[in-house]
Amino acid sequence: QVQLVDSGGGSVQAGGSLRLSCTASGYTSCMSWTWYWYRQAPGEEWKYVSLINSKGITTYRDSVKGRFSISRDNASDTLYLQMNNLLREDTGMYSCKMACLEGDTWEDYWGQGTQVTVSS
């Protein structure tokens, strides 16, 4: 059974930094994969934050460009999101998602989420 565990959230002041982690277990291999970070601000829907794919391509939503950095350690099967210069509007629940190509089908797996709170 695939399991993703998010961690690293917390409360910080604006301008501070946090590094989120997402550790995966229970899956054998993916023919191709894309890892995502999403966030959900209070009262809002989940929104894409960043992705990294199996070719090493990374993308970010405009509001976090230059401040956030996504990476993945293949050896430990851990996804990271380094968040610098945090703003109040970065507050929310953050969750990782793994899209895994299994055969000819893409399967999505989600972490349980980790809360980030940024205060001014």
Image: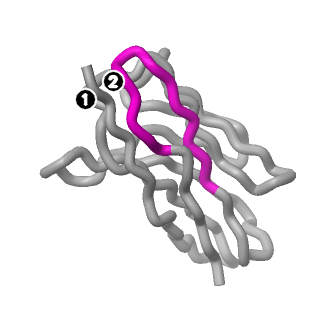
Q: Give 96 or 30, whichever is nearer the viewer.
A: 96
Looking at the image, which residue is at 44% across and 41% down?
A: 10
Relative placement, left or right, of 109 versus 88 is right
Which mark is nearer the camera, 2 or 1?
1
Q: Which residue reaches farthest right?
A: 75
* Label 1: few (<14), some (14–19) or many (≥20) C-alpha neighbours in 10 Å: few
Q: Quadrant of the N terminus?
A: bottom right
- In percent of width and height, residue 88 lies at 26, 26
Taking the image as shown, residue 10 lies to the left or right of residue 88, namely: right
**Are discs 2 and 1 less than 8 Å apart at CB?**
yes
Q: Main secondary structure of the magenta part?
A: strand
Query: Where 96 falls versus 51 (above or below)?
Result: below
The percent position of residue 13, horizontal first and vertical second, equals 36, 22
Residue 90 image-quadrant placement: top left
- As displayed, is residue 86 above or below residue 98? above
Q: Where is mark 2, residue-wise?
A: 63
Q: Residue furthest left?
A: 43
As drawn, the label of residue 89 is 1
**Does the magenta portion include 20?**
yes
Q: Where does residue 119 sit, x and y in percent of width and height?
A: 28, 26
Identified by mark 1, the residue type is: Glu
Q: Is residue 19 left or right of residue 48?
A: right
Q: Position of residue 104 (x, y in %)?
A: 63, 76
Report helix, strand or loop for mark 1.
helix
Q: Is residue 96 above or below residue 83?
A: below
By what rule are the colours in the image chosen? one colour
Kind of element beneath mark 2 = helix
Q: Looking at numbered disc 2 in the image, what kind of residue is underneath it?
A: Ser
Dot placed on the residue nearer the N-terminal end, 2 or 1: 2
Span shown in magenta: 9-22
Residue 113 tag number: none
Which residue is found at the position 44% from the left and 58% from the top?
A: 113
